[in-house]
Amino acid sequence: MRVSDHAGVGTLDLAGPAGRLARWRYTLAGQVAALRLMKLFGQRMAGGVAKETPEAVETAEGEDSTDAELQTPPSTWVLLRLGRFAKPYRKQLIAGFFLTLFSTAATLVPPYLTIPLMDDILIPFQNGQKIDSMRVGLYLGGLLIAALVGWGLGWARTYLLALVSERIGADLRTTTYEHLLTLPLDYFGGKRTGDLMARIGSETDRINVFLSLHALDFANDVLMIVMTAVILISINPLLAVVTLVPLPFIAWMIHVVRDRLRTGFEKIDRVWSEVTNVLADTIPGIRVVKAFAQERREAERFRVANAYNLQVNDKLNRTWSLFTPTVSLLTEIGLLVVWAFGIWQVARGSITVGVLTAFIAYIGRFYTRLDSMSRIVSVTQKAAAGAKRIFDILDHVSNVPEPANPVKVERVQGRIDMSGLGFRYGSRAVIHDLDLTIEPGEMIGLVGHSGSGKSTLVNLICRFYDVTDGAIKVDGTDIRRFAVADYRRHVGLVLQEPFLFFGTIAQNIAYGKPDATREEIVAAARAAHAHDFILRLPHGYDSLVGERGQGLSGGERQRISIARALLIDPRILILDEATSAVDTETEKEIQKALDNLVQGRTTIAIAHRLSTLRKADRLVVMDRGEVVEVGPHDALMAKQGAYWRLYQAQLRQGDDDASEGAADERASAQAPLAISHAAHPAGDA
């Protein structure tokens, strides 16, 4: 059994001694299944037991069939990893801890003062004794001072920790976004825009809220419970033990519910990202939506995603809605037990009414904090699920790594050597054993059928991906030894679909060189034949460009992208179908700009219109990831090989288009005459 693939179409051959027995074809979606079948077939032929283990199902030649991020359940311990972001603020956090400790202690003073206030002042007064005004004033003053101190410390604690949590959240967003920008293109190819936006936006915001509010409340609750328990035990150990009876039951419930909440909230996050994905797809593509009258369909997509989000939330709320009232019921039962046991103790004379009153006051705070801690389980699991999705990004290692000791890029001459080049997308081979040398200042044209590997080769030269086999050398140095950013500063790229950012014309031209002067920007625009149409805009170079270049024609956007490439003065220039999406007149303007752009630079141009590559020094013909012909246009035409066949096919297509156009013109010219004859029969002439 043999597997081969090319351009997304695979072939599975079964052969015997007499030759091929069967052949099956499949698309790329079946690649993992085909490789798994190969593995099982090999085991059977080797005499082993063909058994599908989880590893065999999930992995075939290193390619996972499932998203690893979705297989790892979230854990509350992931929140501890936020410590690296809290480390720069450890002094403020220590100060916040002591403020929390002292403010909690201040709030525990008033119930303690109620014991002498009840036993030494109020109860003796009921028995006919006079009230000692001095002692009453002292106790009331103590209550006031404790309240003021608790308020002041609580304010300082909340303000300080809120500032710290905001900064931790900001650092988390910045670090995640900076790391995201370092990841290779294949990472973004497997992710939805809305999902990544939700992670950096709403997930970091949720973590920030958890740190600024709920983590602070949790710490305060823990301190309150511990300190209250110590005070209760010091007053009356037996009554304290009765007070703490519901605590094990509540802890057991929290343990049972926690796992359900954690996995539930992570699923909610994924489902919500699907809702965001619909928006991220539809809003940028609103012209296509309206052009094909698909508003109702997109609204239905959003409605379905939103309904699923509602369904998942309802399922989780059923668990949460039962948990919270149950905790409240247990705390009420605990309070009832304390009342009953306390009255019995008072009746026996074991404790005073003041002690029971203080106990009730403390126990009210104790159970309030216990109830609050149970409620924070929900928020903690939400934050843990969000933190996991953030660290899924931060833990992803780029497959285009920075070198440990990068070679400094001073001045690039532009010689490119490719030897034994090979590249695979997952398990699919795209480039095979390719050898090519491009001299400095030479213009190379890459031609070949769609899927022949032209764009992949360009991506490898730009180092958007790293080669699987062989090496690409620029001026004799492997490009993997250069720092990625330093190397790419010497590479200019003009795409078939130029991308412009929201901003002014000048800002878009100067994107690769933000400190460029206005004179440099204008000079680049002149060389790109963009200066004239820019001056016709309402505000010239300060005219705002809409998102993705809305408001400009395709040719205008292309010329701005050429000016952007000119401004950085690259030594290596990549032209990827730069003129394929424009009309003939616009192509002439762009071609003039490209003539200025390629001068003195090593240029690699991809074009489907072979006529646009006649100025190339050499043409490189690719097929199935291999170089099949190299040479000037005239030499390749004389050879009558792969390039000649491509050229002839384009000529025939052009002749067919021209004949169809002429037929359409004749039909349109004859149509009025035919109508005239139909309207005036011969008898009425």
Image: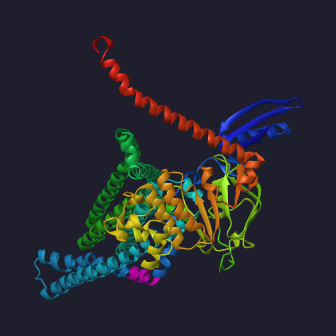
Query: What colour scheme has been applied to the protein in the rendered image?
Result: rainbow
| Residue 53 visible here | no
* Residue at the outermost top position: 683
Q: Is residue 66 magenta?
A: no
- Image location of residue 309, percent across then percent down: 40, 46
> Where is the N terminus found, in terms of image quarters?
top right
- Please say whether residue 92 is one of the residues in the magenta stretch: yes
Q: Nearer the viewer, residue 279 or 650?
A: 650
- Which residue is painted at 53% across and 66% down in the image? 181
Instruction: Choose top left, top right, bottom left or bottom right for residue 508.
Output: bottom left
Q: Position of residue 112 (x, y in %)?
A: 28, 77
Residue 114 makes an appearance in the image: yes
Magenta-tinted stretch? 90-98
* Main secondary structure of the magenta stretch: helix
- Quarter of the picture containing the C terminus is top left
Direction bottom: furthest residue: 134
- Closest to the observer: 655 or 557? 655
Question: Is 580 rendered above or below residue 617?
Answer: above
Q: Would you place residue 613 above or below residue 48 in this image?
A: below
| Residue 201: % across, % down | 41, 63
- 12 or 369, which lies in front? 12
The location of residue 48, given as percent across then percent down, is 83, 40
Q: Quadrant of residue 532?
A: bottom left
Image height of 632 relative to 97, above or below:
above
Q: Quadrant of residue 354?
A: bottom left
Residue at the far front in the pictured view? 685
